[in-house]
Image (spheres, coloured by chain):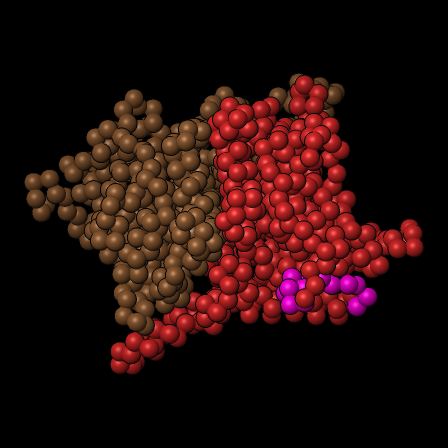
Chain colours: A brown, B red
Amino acid sequence: MTGSNQYDISDVELSEIYSFAIQLAKNAGTILLDSLQQRRQDEFDDNDNDKNETQDSTNSTNVPEELIMEEKLNSVDIVTKTDNEVEEFIHSSIRQKYPLHAFVGEETYSRGSSKEYLVTDEQPTWIVDPLDGTVNFTHGFPMFCVSIALVLNQKPVVGVIYAPLLNQTFSACKGNGAWLNETTKLPLLGSRGVGPIPKNAPSKCIFSCEWGKDRRDTPDGNLHRKVDSFINMAAEVGGRGGKGGMVHGVRSLGSATMDLAYTAMGAFDVWWEGGCWEWDVAAGICLLEEAGGLVTTANPPPDDIDTATIEDARLGGRLYLAIRPAADTVGGETGRQGQERLVREVWRRVRRLDYSRPGA
Amino acid sequence: MTGSNQYDISDVELSEIYSFAIQLAKNAGTILLDSLQQRRQDEFDDNDNDKNETQDSTNSTNVPEELIMEEKLNSVDIVTKTDNEVEEFIHSSIRQKYPLHAFVGEETYSRGSSKEYLVTDEQPTWIVDPLDGTVNFTHGFPMFCVSIALVLNQKPVVGVIYAPLLNQTFSACKGNGAWLNETTKLPLLGSRGVGPIPKNAPSKCIFSCEWGKDRRDTPDGNLHRKVDSFINMAAEVGGRGGKGGMVHGVRSLGSATMDLAYTAMGAFDVWWEGGCWEWDVAAGICLLEEAGGLVTTANPPPDDIDTATIEDARLGGRLYLAIRPAADTVGGETGRQGQERLVREVWRRVRRLDYSRPGA
């Protein structure tokens, strides 16, 4: 204990928690894979049944339960039965092993009426997304994952992301670096390999962003603010009234957690997003920071972009700008200086997003 | 031979070609992986050297050759040494085994001055992209692949896509279906599992698209035509003057070939793109059609969207709209009718793109 509300956990205990979290994420991911496999099996069983029956067109309604649920719900914000099952599995495993720790999980939270930020400094808090990239999961697109983090005093100190269909485990524990599949240090090519932030960044950068769920067609709504920002980042240098960033590529995976993991890996140079929640980013922030990346707010300061202090993103702030790990340049710019330069270059090109929440 | 310029290949020969193409794609993918691994190894060697030397900041310039090349070239259209090596490996393997067949490869073609369409009906033609998703490859993002197709009389009859970092092989041979890793039939969830085209499509659909390389900020340029189309697909129903499509999600992977593979898999419902070339799509078109998907032109007809005949995409046409495999509905709409309905719904929301070429 370093203060009245400040928790401290010994290195040994943290190391135990880290191993527990990795195994837990893998077990949870296996449940996701089984569910996907079961849907495939149901399909084959249906086909077998068809062969033994006379033609009956009503048979076509015999689709797997997850897909029926999809029909019933909002066309973007799908919640599947699997989501809930996996969260309950993770929650009960944690409750059993660490009964004094707090727990914030996406499904439990979403069922509540409050949208307040619930992570306190009173006790270690597990922040869990049992299935990030739900739409991808329902479609069989491999960019979905389990995300498990432990937060101490508002800082994620353990982060594990497991993408079972990619067979990729991303993990980090404060002070011990970030890892792919537990054996390959991140960034993937090393900080030398990913190199410094390019001289004319965001040119030569891969820009990762998401269209999100707020699709209201109001001139000043988040959809148009986002798209304006995307176009500024993509357009030729000199275009868009000087804001053209001519990024190397624009990527949208449909999973904030995978976006962050790939930024930590060095595969993406910049990830910019508003609207996601703490369970989407807690593990990814730990991973990114341990890999040597930077994460701050998506929203540019109103007037002092060139000089504003670049502060760490607030976990519950719903606005994130992440920059990949970076090497120092020959000219003497440190990796951190290069990252801050890129933060300001992104801020110059993006609009402020409007995602508020009570209590944050 | 079924005509003066019409080639026919026996089923036995086609089956041999198919096996040859699968093995060739895997071997080529292994070269790509080795190259990625070598870059990681170079990094570690550099680090080791650093330990034995006095601090010397010029050492930071000792980056792998691929990354130096990246600095030298256009910031979007990277060509790496690996690209050329892999194409030469594939080309020489084919030349040895099938000396009478023609060959069109991305690297060879791009070095030529002509942009004409070179695939004739005179002989079987291999169409090869040694590395699709080059930018992803240079960044270590797993969405890159080898793409190998055999085209007879303008139709791809064999298509193999191998994504080595995902360890996914997509393959198809005319009349024999489409497969993931040679054992799992596509679409992944079966046509029953992926279901019919949703009633209010493009709502509930995953829409796959790419920002591409043409980033000119001219009001009627391809960038703005594309983005207008993306916004129409994404915006709420009723928005954008009635064009709002409220798709489930928008995805951009940075690889046309992987987009097509995931559409064949059923992971994406719609892929819409202009500007890519025959080596980007030849294998994917074979895969998609064998899985039960549909591929036509990206550009809507000028006036008769409701009634226009939906024709197969022209291989060299540079404009593609692909729809995933689909089951029949209970109400009696066939999978094909559902796909055509979705084609028209997409056409209503997208603008005509301007990618021309001589001879096509």
Indicate the position of residue A143 as horizontal and vertical percent values. Answer: 47, 44
The reply to whether residue A150 is visible in this rendering is: no
The answer to which of B220 and B290 lies nearer the viewer is B220
Q: Where is residue B309 in the image (x, y as percent from the top left)?
A: 75, 33
Q: In which quarter of the image is the N terminus of chain A?
A: top left
Quadrant containing the C terminus of chain A is top left
Q: How many marks?
A: 0
Is residue B1 found left or right of B125 in the rendered image?
Answer: right
Outermost residue toward the left?
A4
Identify which residue is drawn at 50% across, 66% down: B73
In this rendering, the answer to whether B205 lies above or below A306 is above
Asked if residue A273 shows in the view, the reply is yes
Query: Residue at the spot x=40%, y=52% of the render?
Result: A242
Q: Residue at x 69, y 40 (%)?
A: B296
Residue A64, position in %: x, y? 56, 27
x and y percent of residue B8 in the render?
86, 53
Which quadrant of the structure image shows residue B186?
top right
Q: Does the magenta stretch include residue A312?
A: no
Report the side of A62 relative to B99 (left or right).
left
> Closest to the observer: A123 or B231?
B231
- Horizontal side, residue B205 vs residue A218: left or right: right
In the rendered view, tell whether residue A154 sits above or below residue A326. above
Left or right of A23? Residue B340 is right
Picture quadrant where residue A42 is located? top right
**In the rendered structure, which segment of residues is drawn in magenta?**
B99-112
**Looking at the picture, does residue A2 appear above or below residue B341?**
below
Q: Nearer the viewer, residue B70 or A73?
A: B70
Seen at 78% across and 51% down, the residue is B154
